[in-house]
Image: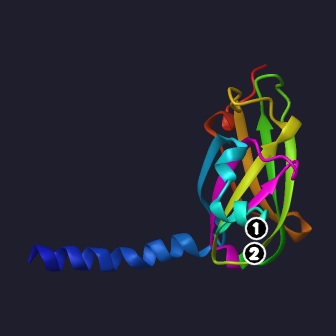
Amino acid sequence: MRLIATFLLLIGLLPSTALANEGSEVEFVRIWPQWRSDDSFLRISEYLSGEENTGRQTVLRSQPEKRTGFYFLVRVKGAHEASGATKFVLEVITPDSAQAKVYNFPTAITKRSQVFNLGLTGSDWKGKKVHPVAWRLRLIADEDRELASQQSFLWALPESN
């Protein structure tokens, strides 16, 4: 009897979850901010071919010739809705400035679910011990249409007078 009641309850909840997800075509499943060294990108195939192998991830860097830096590992779900020219807009507040620095990462969405590594590299990041105070990441389609947005807790704090 309990099994039947549980089953009926789950069936009853399905339409409400479908409606809740109906309006959001693209979402950030997770964002992991972390420091990465140049060595963390090396794979055996790179020793053989001399070319970087990023696997199934799309790696975008603020300074493409530099690998070491602070990265935001982003998993995008429902990305097929955003196929075509898009860009990530990453706004970061660092300990040395209260003004947000803005970085644009143009990309093309090609899959239903995709993983991106967005790197602030070279002179754009001060070093391993520096962590962002606050950040906001947005995925923008053509005509500045926002597809997804996520921010750190401190980004949402109100400004003091």
Q: Quadrant of residue 161?
A: top right
For residue 71: magenta?
yes
Q: Mark 1 and 2 residues: CB-CB less than 8 Å, in contact? A: no
Residue at image point 14% right, 76% down:
3
Residue 32 placed where, x, y %? Answer: 60, 48
Mark 2 residue type: Ala
Residue 135 placed where, x, y %? Answer: 72, 40
Q: Quadrant of the N terminus?
A: bottom left
Label 2 sits on a secondary structure element that is: helix
Closer to the eye: label 1 or 2: 1
Q: Is residue 52 above or below residue 131?
A: below
Mark 1 residue type: Ser
Q: Which mark is residue 49?
A: 1
Which residue of the protein is positioned furthest toward the front in this rendering? 48
Which residue of the protein is positioned furthest toward the left in this rendering? 1
Residue 115 vs residue 45, the one in the foreground:
45
Q: Which residues are magenta?
A: 58-80
Q: CA distance from mark 1 to mark 2?
A: 33 Å
Judge whether residue 79 can be spotted in this image.
yes
Residue 136 vs residue 43, the one in the foreground:
43
Q: Which mark is residue 101?
A: none
Which residue of the protein is positioned furthest toward the right in this rendering? 143
Residue at image point 65% right, 59% down:
43
For disc 2, the neighbor class at 10 Å (few under 14, some 14 to 19, many from 20) is many
Label 1 sits on a secondary structure element that is: helix
Residue annotated with mark 2: 82
For disc 1, the neighbor class at 10 Å (few under 14, some 14 to 19, many from 20) is few
